[in-house]
Image (cartoon, rainbow, N blue to C red):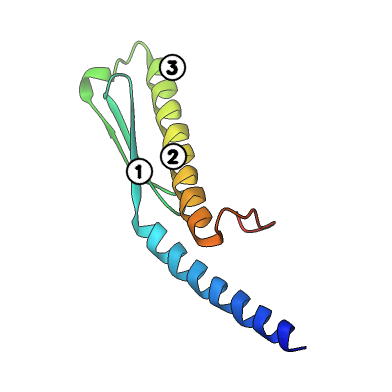
Amino acid sequence: MKGMGNMMKQAQKIQSKMLRMQEELASKTVETTAGGGMIKVVANGSQQIVSIKIEKEVVDPEDVEMLEDLVLAAVNDALAKSQQMVSSEMSKLTGGMKIPGLM
């Protein structure tokens, strides 16, 4: 029974560290660009888009689809980088163990 108590304490410590890490990750950001830097997207560790910057030179009223494609590519890349950042940090916390339902 003593082993179970120790295991519960360990689980509580990990949970506490995870909550702290989630708070820290929410303030960390990743940045990506598309269209040769004409579109810049910033996402945080909560997988939220924080900002989108579009250079006016890429805005062509005759080719809105290109702009949409560039924004979509940059947003998807920013979210992927954000997820990688979170996975990397969680891996440090869990020692590389894959814990179901954690991420």
Q: Quadrant of the N terminus?
A: bottom right
Q: Position of residue 73 (x, y in %)?
A: 44, 26
Up the image or down, 43 lies above or below 97; here it is above
Q: Looking at the image, which is closer to me, 2 or 32?
A: 2
Residue at the spot of label 1: 30
Residue at (48, 49) in percent of width and height? 88
Q: Position of residue 103 (x, y in %)?
A: 60, 54
Labels 3, 2: front one: 2
Mark 1 or mark 2, which is nearer the start of the sequence? 1
Label pair 2/1, CB-CB below 8 angstroms: yes
Q: Name which quarter of the figure residue 58 lies in.
A: top left
Q: CA distance from mark 3 to mark 1?
A: 25 Å
Q: Name which quarter of the figure residue 9 lies in.
A: bottom right
Q: CA distance from mark 3 to mark 2?
A: 24 Å
Q: Secondary structure at mark 2?
A: helix
Residue at the spot of label 3: 65
- Which amino acid type corresponds to the residue marked 3 in the rendered image? Glu
Q: Viewed as shown, does residue 15 lie left or right of 20?
A: right
Up the image or down, 75 lies above or below 92; here it is above
Q: Secondary structure at mark 1?
A: strand
Q: Looking at the image, which is closer to me, 5 or 49?
A: 5
Mark 2 or mark 3, which is nearer the start of the sequence? 3
In the orientation shown, which residue stands out farthest toward the top? 62
Q: Which mark is residue 81?
A: 2
